[in-house]
């Protein structure tokens, strides 16, 4: 699994709890322990919020500082459209 960083969008990989959130802090890793991160959940009823989660239980959804992959953007309804060129 890729190293998770602050700002990454993740989803909890539990079979019943597919909650989506953003990493707000990476906890210090101790020798022999799995890495932990603090996640601010998008679902308002998820408590505690933010919560300390084992990084292995999270799936990376999007890394905001990287450009999206592929030649088109997926719009609402799953329609793929060509991206407009950006001027410098």
Image: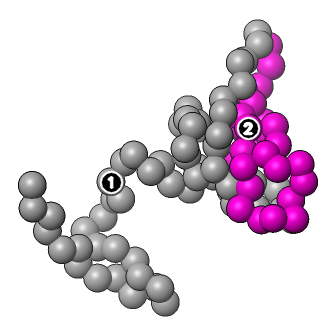
Is the residue 59 above or below the residue 80 in the image?
Answer: above
Q: Is residue 49 left or right of residue 39?
A: right
Please state the extent of the stretch shown in magenta in the rendering.
32-58
Q: In the image, what residue occupies the spot 71% across and 62% down?
A: 42
Q: Which residue is mark 2?
A: 38
Q: Position of residue 82 (x, y in %)?
A: 23, 78
Q: What SS does tag 2 mark?
A: strand
Mark 1 vs mark 2, CA separation in Å: 24 Å
Q: Is residue 31 visible?
A: yes
| 77 magenta-colored | no
Q: Quarter-wise, where is residue 74 in the image? A: bottom left
**Are the residues at dot 1 and dot 2 in contact (C-beta closer than 8 Å)?**
no
Q: In the image, what residue occupies the spot 79% across and 39% down?
A: 53
Q: Position of residue 15 (x, y in %)?
A: 83, 62
Q: Is residue 87 left or right of residue 21?
A: left
Is the residue 14 above or below the residue 70 in the image?
Answer: above
- Classify the position of the N terminus by image quarter: top right
- Classify the position of the C terminus by image quarter: bottom left
Q: Nearer the viewer, mark 1 or mark 2?
A: 2
């Amino acid at each position: 699994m890729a190293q998770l960083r602050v700002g990454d969008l993740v989803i909890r990989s539990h079979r019943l709890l597919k909650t989506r959130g953003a990493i707000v802090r990476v906890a210090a890793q101790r020798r022999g322990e799995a890495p932990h991160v603090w996640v601010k959940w998008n679902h308002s009823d998820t408590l505690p919020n933010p919560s300390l989660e084992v990084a292995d239980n999270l799936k990376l959804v999007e890394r905001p500082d990287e450009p999206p992959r592929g030649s088109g953007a997926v719009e609402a309804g799953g329609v793929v459209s060509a991206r407009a060129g950006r001027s410098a």
